[in-house]
Amino acid sequence: MKLSNKFSRRDFIRTGSIGLGALAMAPALKSFARPKKKKLGIALVGLGSYSTGQLGPALRHTKECYLAGIVTGTPSKAVAWSKKYNIPKKNIYNYQNFDEIAKNPDIDIIYVVLPVFMHKEYTIKAAQAGKHVICEKPMALNAGECEEMIAACKKANRLLSIGYRLHFEPHNMEVMRLGQKHILGNIKHIDTGNGFTYNGDPNAWRLKKALAGGGGLMDMGVYCIQGARYTIGEEPVAVKATQEKLRPDFFKEVDETVFWELEFPNKLVTTGKSSYNNDWSYLKAEAENGNFELGPAYGYNAIDGSINGSPMKFPQIIQQAAQMDDFAKCVTLNKQSRVAGEEGLKDMKVVDAIYRSLESGKWERIG
Amino acid sequence: MKLSNKFSRRDFIRTGSIGLGALAMAPALKSFARPKKKKLGIALVGLGSYSTGQLGPALRHTKECYLAGIVTGTPSKAVAWSKKYNIPKKNIYNYQNFDEIAKNPDIDIIYVVLPVFMHKEYTIKAAQAGKHVICEKPMALNAGECEEMIAACKKANRLLSIGYRLHFEPHNMEVMRLGQKHILGNIKHIDTGNGFTYNGDPNAWRLKKALAGGGGLMDMGVYCIQGARYTIGEEPVAVKATQEKLRPDFFKEVDETVFWELEFPNKLVTTGKSSYNNDWSYLKAEAENGNFELGPAYGYNAIDGSINGSPMKFPQIIQQAAQMDDFAKCVTLNKQSRVAGEEGLKDMKVVDAIYRSLESGKWERIG
């Protein structure tokens, strides 16, 4: 093991251990102890509203990674982003030359922020290009696609993570602690809902089944499935769902509002609902010795919560910055993210079962 | 000249004349006289809101042309449009393989519906690909670019038209007739304004100077310059302009509201104004023996007007369908459109002079 000023912290961490002999050299290693850290380069694929409004701005606040490149089919976006974020031309790709990104050493991580139907294709392409991948939620059109994505990343020996930002958000993390560690005893019930009143462009991809996979359930409901799962810390076994459609002309192809009961082990049944036609964002948990809740629970900011009626006192953070920094650390340490592809797969199995239940009108087993 | 059933009306018209000997054969030519007419194929380049909300739907109502192809960098739009308008895969292009459109016989006309900074490049590419071109307004970033576009189309022997739909709108056509034919005597004054309160995406290309060329003047003011020019039927010689900016944080790079005086020959001075922060759409003309006005004057529908206070009674039409059908006829007849590239150039010379006047604070000569 060669030690020199060029030996970076990243190399150090990757090596994983350092002999006691080296540690004994401490005085000579002052510059080694705090070397200049290289931030990992992220490329955003797809410059829609989430990239524009959330990820781009968040990448101004990351410490472990930075916005190194973009992939867009829209020339005007290429010009605007290049100028705004000082991205060199050589790091700007489109959907035709995407695979050439393999040759670009500036890009360590590819973040897939595309319509759902493209998640599988570009996650696999990214891994095959030798890059680590973050894929936005919902992970894919169905659980089968998720499995292909996980297998492809494994085969390419690349890490895969899903854009589950709330695993890094203090109020949601508190809920995980309260539930999973039985702080107020076992969970007796959870009710959670997430939705907004969709009045946007009727031509948006989110309203097309072939492009989005589904409607409010895919987009908003996944948060509730996550919420129930990470509060309880176990995997659900069955689900029964119903739906309501008040604006069939607008939601021609996709679900509007969906209600479900989700059964966990030990006969614990939680309720959840998702909507493109109601403004919901809450999680209420009842435990043996008290209760806790979040509201707003799932938004990009202004998350709030309480325990037995007393407000939680956590800071608001830039969730996406925390999420991307965590994944950059995982890449540096070569360890699985807490929101790896398997986490997305578990949610998609629930989503698939909910759609089956909407068809059958019956309880459906998950998985 | 070979006459057969395969001799189409289009070939006939292109040939331009037919000998008397052939006409004498009339009885044998029944199938020749009214052959099945081939609609010309249009490809839309750029699938933003104008293509999505106006041109695509209008192309369901055209008689001389149809939506044969699309050019988009956004894969989800390619899928959605292909499905919605039944466009075959071979007629879907992106910005990387655009030039291959030259080989596609389905495409006769290319309609450039891109951000302004791309108008010149894609108009020239389209003409060089052997296609006739419609370019959206404003024609380009400045008059110099317009001249290059006109020259390139001339060199390629292709027709060029600007998307000036109001030349085909009955109320606006009535105003042209009233003014240009001096129906109420000579015009003594015109006042016209066009604008809307822009509250959309702050990242939109329309707010970036490099992409849009300017703000409300380029986008909305061009209608007023058109309105004054086509009511009077002469070309303005000088202009003086001032501006107002009430939302500098939003309109960081481009003009918000611009006011101008536009001098025509014989000392006729008209007033105009454009805005991204006021809802205007009117043209008021005072003539020697009466007055007439339009309001709304410039929108996509619900145009209204009056002459000496009596309402005009014209139908509302699908302006873009009429405009595209007219250009398709021009292509078939190989004649210049009434809204040829030169018409766009004239407006851009006025726009350029307005921007010069905003700089200098003085009257500026046009051209």
Image: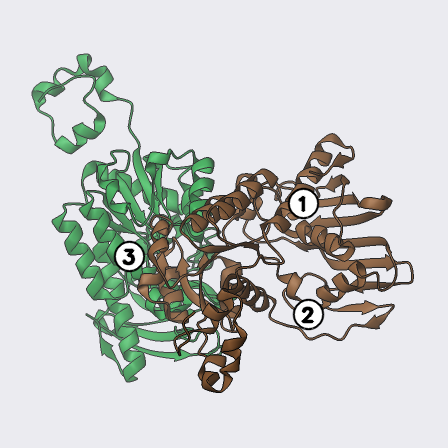
Chain colours: A brown, B green
Q: Is residue A261 left or right of residue B30?
A: right
Whether labels 2 and 3 belong to a single chain: the reply is: no
Instruction: Check disc 3 and report the residue beneath it.
Output: B119
Q: How many marks?
A: 3
The residue at the far bottom in this view is A27
Q: Is residue A283 left or right of residue B267?
A: right
Instruction: Check disc 2 and report the residue beneath it.
Output: A302
Three-letter code, disc 3: His
Three-letter code, disc 2: Ala
Q: Quadrant of the rendered structure where residue A315 is?
A: bottom right
Query: Circles 1 and 2: CB distance less than 8 Å?
Result: no
Which is in the foreground here, disc 2 or disc 3?
A: 2
Q: Is residue B265 left or right of residue B79?
A: left
Q: Position of residue B326 (x, y in %)?
A: 29, 42
Residue B241's tag is: none
Nearer the observer, B23 or B76: B76
Which is in the foreground here, disc 1 or disc 3?
A: 1
Instruction: Check disc 1 and report the residue beneath it.
Output: A256
Nearer the observer, B233 or B324: B324
Q: CA distance from mark 2 to mark 3?
A: 43 Å
Point 23% across, 61% down: residue: B345
Three-letter code, disc 1: Glu
Q: From the viewer's perspective, is residue B313 above or below residue A177?
A: above
Which is in the foreground here, disc 1 or disc 2?
A: 2
Nearer the observer, B294 or B75: B75
The chain ID associated with circle 1 is A
Point 27% across, 63% down: residue: B347
Give the secondary structure at mark 1.
Answer: loop
